[in-house]
Every structure is written in C-alpha cells, then in structure tokens.
Amino acid sequence: MTPARFLRTFATFAVAAVLPLGAGAAEPVQVRPHVTQQRPGPAMNRKGPVASAPKGLSTQTWTPDNGDGTFTNPLFYDEFSDPDLIRVGDWFYLTGTTMHAMPGVPILRSKDLVNWEFVAYALDKLDLGPAYRLEGGSNIYGQGIWAPSLRYHEGKFHIFSNVNGQATQMFTATDPKGPWTRTPMKRSFHDLSVLFDDDGRAYVVWDHQTMRLAQLTDDLTDIVPGTERVLFAADAGMGEGAHFYKIDGKYYIISAEYAGGFRMPAARADHVLGPYEVNRSISSHEDFGMASSKRLGTPRPPFETWGPDPAAKHSLAMHQGGIVQTPEGEWWGFSMMDFNSVGRLLSLSPITWKDGWPYFGLPGNLTRTPRTWVKPKTATPQPVRVPFQRSDDFSAPQLQPLWQWNHVPIDDKWSLSERPGFLRLHALPATSFYDARDTLTQRAIGPMSTPTVLLDASNLKPGDTAGLGLLNLPYATLGVERLTDELDVVSYDQRLDQRVRVKTTATRIWLRADCDFLTERARFSYSFDGITFTPIGGEVVLFYQTFTFQGVRYGLFNYNTTGAEGGFADFDSIDVHQRHTHGLMRPIPYGRSIRLASFHATTGLAASQGRLASGVPTRFEIVDRKLGRVALRSGRRYVTVGEDGEVTLVAGQSGTAQDFQWIETPTGELVLMSLATNRFLRIDPQTGDIRADSSGPMPDDSDGARFVWSQSKGAAPANPGIGSTRLQARHLGSGR
C-alpha cells in the first residue's frame, strides 16, 4: 500500500526546551536479570541453520502456534507488510516489503502456514545512488523495495517488486535459497501482481482503483505493445495492492482499499481481459478490537499529529493480501493490519467460498477473521518454528538474518572479526541518528519487548555518539557520547527535542528500552553492572507513521557530529526480552469456576433460577472442549446459543451450540466466539440483552463483547483486566 492519501494534520505537539545537564535522571531501581528460556525450533542465518541464542540471553519469542491445534494472529508480532504467498508442492513461500532496509526481499517457508522458517534474502543491497547510502543529506526512507509479487513458473521463482523512481525490479532463482538474479524491467508497475496463464502467456495487473492489465513479453521485462487496458471505473470499488489468480477457470483480482476503514475488494471474470465483476468487500472491519493511536502528520519538527480515529471506524482493519490453497484442499487468506507503532503485521484467515467469492471468515460471519482459530490441516504434524533469533552475542561469523542495515551499509566500516564476539561500528560523520550510516536494525516486536545492549565505549573519539535507538519518526536514542574530556550517557527524544545527560567514567555500559506497543510508550534506562538500571529521560511516545513506512526498529549506531570519521564502538550483545509470546496473556482456566464481568463494569454474566441475565457475575465452570474451546456450565446447565444468536441456559450434554472459542483481544480482554453462529457473545451495554451476534469486538467496546474473567470470590473482579489500561489509553488518544 502506498503512502496514505487520507492523512490529515490536526494537532501540534509543543517543542520543549532542552533539559539542563543531568536533569531527568531518576534514582536507581533493582531489576532482576531476565529468565532465559529455550525457544523451540532452529534459528537460521543467511546461509543456513545456526545454534540457538547464547546462554544467558533471552530466547523466548512470539509464536502464533498455541500448542493445542490452534493459532493466534498475528503470525509474526513484528512488521511483515505487503505480503505475497504461494505454494510450491508441500511448501508455502512468503515474501514482503523491506523498503530502505538492507538486505531486502526476505523469503520464508512453511508447511502449515503458521510455523515459518527463514530461507534467504533475494537482495543483498540495492545501491542506485547517494540517497540509498544516506549520502549528501539525501535518503530513501519510505522508498526502496515494496509490494513484491511472488510467483513460481516452470521451475523458477520470480519476485517482481516496486522501487520508487525506478523501473520495477525482477528477481529470479531456481532455488529459493539463491542465488537470486536481479533484472530491471523496462517500466514501473505500481503495486503489481503477475499471473502465468495456462497457455504460457504472462499478464500483469497494476495501479490504483481503475487498475491496468497487460500481457508481458516473453522475457517478462516489458508489456506487449497494444495489450494495455484499463479494467475498472474509478468508482467501481477496487483499490490497490493487487493479487492476481486463476482458480477453476476464472480470473480473480484481490485488492485493498480505504473507504472510511480498510476493506478488501475483489473482482472476477471468465476471461483474463474481462469484463470483471466487482465485489466491494471480501474482508472488512477486522481489527480484532484494536483502536487506532495518534498518527504523525509531518515528517520533521515541529511534529504535527492527527487522530486518533474514532474507535468505531476500524481504521486499522486487515487489508492488502490474497489467498492460497493447501495440499489438503483448504483455502486460507493472508493480509496485513496496521498494528500502530509496531508496524503492519501479517494475519491468517480461514476462507469461506460463497457464490463463487472467497470470503475471509467463517459461515455466518463472512468478512471477519477470528483472531484465534484451528490451524490448517497438514499430512503430518509440524513442529513449532520461528523464523528469527532476536538476541545476539555477535559470536557467529555472519550477522543473523534478522538484522538489516538502515540503507546501504559501508562494508569496511563495520566488522564482526576485528574483535571476535563483538559487533564493531566505526563512527562516520552524521548530523543525527536519522542520517547516521551503518546503523544496524531489527524490527521491534510486540506486544511488549525490552532490548538491552551491552556497549564498550572505551574507543569513542570526541564527537562520537554510540548506543541504542528507536528508529521511527519521531525517533529516540539512548547512547554514550564522547566529549573532549568526558563521557556522557545521553537520552534524546526527537519529538520534544530533549536531551538528558549523565556524566560517567564507566566505559562498559548497558543501555535498555522498555517498549510497550499497546500503550505506545517506551522508557530508557542504563546500568553499569547489568543488574541495577537507572531510568533516564521522560516517557517516549511511539507513533505509527507513513513517512518511513515502517514500524519502530531497534537500532545499534555510532556516528560522529564533528564532520569527520571518529573512533569505534564495540557492541558485546543485545538481549531482547519479551513478556508475552503467545496469543493468550492468561491461560484458559480449564476445570475451574470463574466469573465473567463486562469490561469496565461491575455487572456481567449471571445465572439465576435457570436463566441468564446481566447482573452481579455468578460462577461458571470452564469445560475443556479441546482446540482452545470451552463450554460454560452453571450447575447442570450450559450456556447455549441458538441459530439466531439467542443465548439461554439449557440442561444436558454440551455440543456445538454450547461451544465457544476462547479468544483474547490484543489488549488482553476475553471474547467468546460461539461455534453455533461464529459470532461473539455480548451483553448489550444499553439494554442488558445477552446474545451471540457480534461480528467482532468493537474497538470502543460499544457492542459489549469484551469480558474480564476472575477466579476471585468477590462479586466482580477488582482489577478490570490485564489490557484494560491499554485499551482505555487508546480510547483517550494514545500519544497525548
């Protein structure tokens, strides 16, 4: 998806004065070292498998596999945008946008669409001029490689990808591990998708709303003269980000469009040239109950912001993706969703075919995707895998595949071998973190994560600043700065243009950023022993923005502000600790009795004299129905859902009418999806009526579908829920 056409600028943040030397440093706090847990599945580097993270570093990371036959979206809790996905034999292959980060165009593979492993990058670096190298004050932030189309034809993998101001680039390989060959095409195709037809001809679809179609030449570098045509009227309902398919003799184009909220229009035809019939939405409004945070309206100080959008607008909803069929005959959809400052994340959706259209969602609730659902069927069970290892002690001879450079690196100014076991960054001249070359980045991961960097600053020269950055707009950094005769620990918040300095004589320093991507806040701290961490600076506000068109990235940097090259910084390690690595912040309380209170209320689900009502919550036993499903039993009666969504208490054995999929919203509240209607149980906040007819939890909870469960003996839980403060902050407007 190209930069949003609907950005508005509402408000302006005041720019605060620079704090005096040493201001803002708080008293030290004791912090326990992170518990190391073994992550299942192998990590891989750019040339194959490597060992798990070194002993003493955090290894547990987000996995969508719940271990009970279900998965929870997103597939990755770090940015994976503009996805394209195909199946070749038993393997699924996936690629996506990498913009200005190098290497680019990653290829992942999976056998079950849930557990993925890294294969390779199709592009080591794209160097098309000074801006690609952050030279001369120029950059390609928000540009570079984006919206790739992945295809396989006659023994060869093809990736076609956009590059701003350049012709579309084609990458080809017979083995997805490489080597990959890059070939510039003769022209640019905005948000293209390629289709190899059964007769050997290849076609390309591209552009926004009206969309264009043409036949490609045999070498795939240009269009056949006279074959280009416009497919749709501008108001037909189509969008951009095309995914082009031929299924059972019909041609399908799936796109993404913003129309007061994101949706996925589709078109179909009996002939590749049309005419095409449009379905304005095969997926819409699915945001899993997430509310929008504030957005950045200007790319430079003084920063202006707008929003957040009204919570009921579904402005984060899933969009831009396609569909794929498994070897077992199932159809699944894939698409991305704006998850605020952590970036655009990838989700998996069951597909229901109806009237010849592939709807995202389940029967009875088409266009809506359950956040937690049963994994795709496979011939053999698949182990839990994750594509990347996040913590690193830099002991390997090559960088792990998670790492990407901010723009094209200067290869002789960084090293893993000059001091084995350390990443060495030589300082190059720059005016700020934003234009510093050889900044090594990895995507931030949600919902909360804490990178801690151990830095040896003993070889910094005057003017050098090295450390840990939150690469975003606005950005924030925590580093060590060498002045003429001293070292300072320095935090900087670009939004406020505030620096906080603390003098130090230490050269071995731990730098930490506690990041919460549900509240959109981060806090810096530092330590001289790795145990006692001292907060520094104020709370950093994190924004989603479409200027770099990336979510927050953790960056290791070293630059010199005197206009000359400086010394070098040695990074001993980075530890990325994650508090929540599965789809449930709290395990399902099978076999226990709980109370269900409505979110932000003292009332909830109550059983009395064989009937259900909204009142003081009463106890319900949680019966295990396998696959992350439960039945709610009160005495000998079960909460039961009729085909029309009516909810009653019925005596007898439990079955489909009594089964609910136990799901958490991203902010941690409970939602219960009835398997009788594939809709969500709710207590109407206005009338108190209890029904299972919600299509999905509203971001503002106006439908009453969110619950907070408790095993306490009181009438209602005193704590409104793990995610409640985060959700409330969203409604008040994150970024205030």
Image: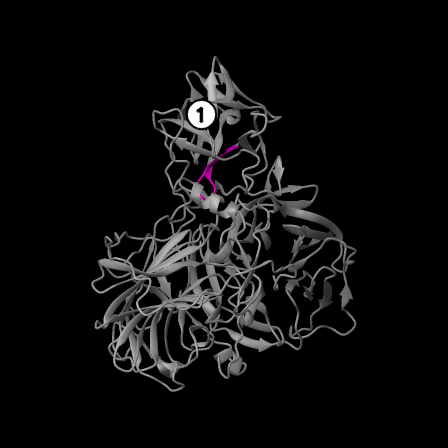
State the image coordinates of residue 400 (x, y, percent, origin top left).
Answer: 36, 67
- State the residue in front, 548 or 207: 548
Name the residue rendered at 48%, 12% in the picture: 609
Name the residue rendered at 53%, 41% in the picture: 370
Q: Is residue 660 visible?
A: yes
In the rendered image, which quarter contains the N terminus?
Answer: bottom right
State the image coordinates of residue 358 (x, y, percent, origin top left).
Answer: 64, 46
Q: Is residue 668 magenta?
A: yes
State the image coordinates of residue 266 (x, y, percent, origin top left).
Answer: 68, 52
Which colour style is shown? Answer: one colour
Sort mark 1 into few (<14), some (14-19) or many (20+) by Cα contacts within 10 Å: many
Q: Is residue 249 visible?
A: no
Report the magenta residues as a range: 663-673
Name the residue rendered at 38%, 59% in the picture: 538
Q: Which residue is mark 1?
A: 632
State the image coordinates of residue 533 (x, y, percent, origin top left).
Answer: 26, 59
- Disc 1 on helix, strand or loop? strand
- Count of labels shown? 1
* For residue 252, side relative to residue 543 (left or right): right
Task: Answer with the quarter of the image where residue 165 lies.
Answer: bottom right
Q: Identify the amino acid type marked 1.
A: Leu
Residue at the farthest bottom position: 564
- State the residue in front, 375 or 701: 701
Q: Is residue 295 magenta?
A: no
Name the residue rendered at 48%, 44% in the picture: 727
Say above or below: 319 vs 407: above
Task: Answer with the quarter of the image where residue 198 lies.
Answer: bottom right
